[in-house]
Image (tube, rainbow, N blue to C red):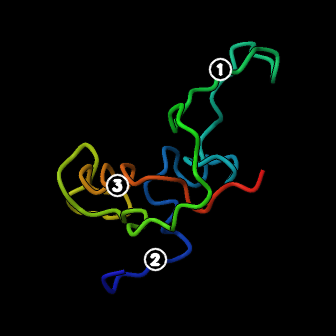
Amino acid sequence: PNGVYGTRTTPTTDNVLPPALQTSFKIPTNGKPSPLFGAQPYTQQLLLFEEFGTEKLDPTLPAPPLTFPVPIVGPAPTQDPNNIARSGPSAAALEAFMRQPGLYPFPAQ
């Protein structure tokens, strides 16, 4: 993008720990994993929120005209003024995308 290409060391540039102290590439920061503070996996009820509202989805709606907005450079906190890889889409474009009716592709199950 924009004529700038990375190398094998590009992903490690902004890591919390220097390469000699990194423990694994499985953790996004290549740092140590967060402590669990005694939490056990899947022992508590997971509360789900209705992200799409309570209206029934219509499987016959056509595909929406707007695709998911791409990140852009811009002001903080949602964008980075210099680095598109650290940015998100503009709030207006994201809101316009989310206001579209229906869900595409419609879930099979």
Comes first in the chain, label 1 or label 3: 1
Task: Give the number of the mark in front: 2 or 3.
Answer: 3
The quarter holding residue 87 reads: bottom left
> Percent from the top left, x then y, of residue 97?
37, 56
Image mark for residue 47: 1
Q: Which amino acid does label 3 sit on?
A: Gly
> Percent from the top left, x then y, of residue 2?
30, 82
Q: Can residue 7 be seen in this view?
A: yes
The quarter holding residue 90 reads: bottom left
| Residue at 55 percent of width and 47 percent of height | 29
Comes first in the chain, label 1 or label 2: 2
| Residue at 76 percent of width and 14 percent of height | 44
Query: How far, Cα to Cα, is label 1 from label 2?
Result: 40 Å
Comes first in the chain, label 2 or label 3: 2
Q: What residue type is labelled 1?
A: Leu
| Residue at 51 percent of width and 67 percent of height | 62
Circle 3 residues within 10 Å: few <14, some 14–19, many ≥20:
some
Image mark for residue 71: none
Q: Relative to 96, is 63 on the left or the right?
A: right
Query: How far, Cα to Cα, is label 2 from label 3?
Result: 20 Å
Q: Which amino acid does label 2 sit on?
A: Gly
Considering depth in this image, is 12 or 97 the residue closer to the camera? Answer: 97
Q: Relative to 97, is 108 on the left or the right?
A: right
Quickly name the residue at label 2. Answer: 6
Marks 1,2: beta carbons within 8 A: no
Please identify the residue farthest to the bottom as the structure is shown.
3
> Percent from the top left, x then y, of residue 8?
56, 74
Q: How many marks?
A: 3
Secondary-structure class at tag 1: loop
Quickly name the residue at label 3. Answer: 88
| Residue at 23 percent of width and 63 percent of height | 82
> Percent from the top left, x then y, of residue 51?
52, 35
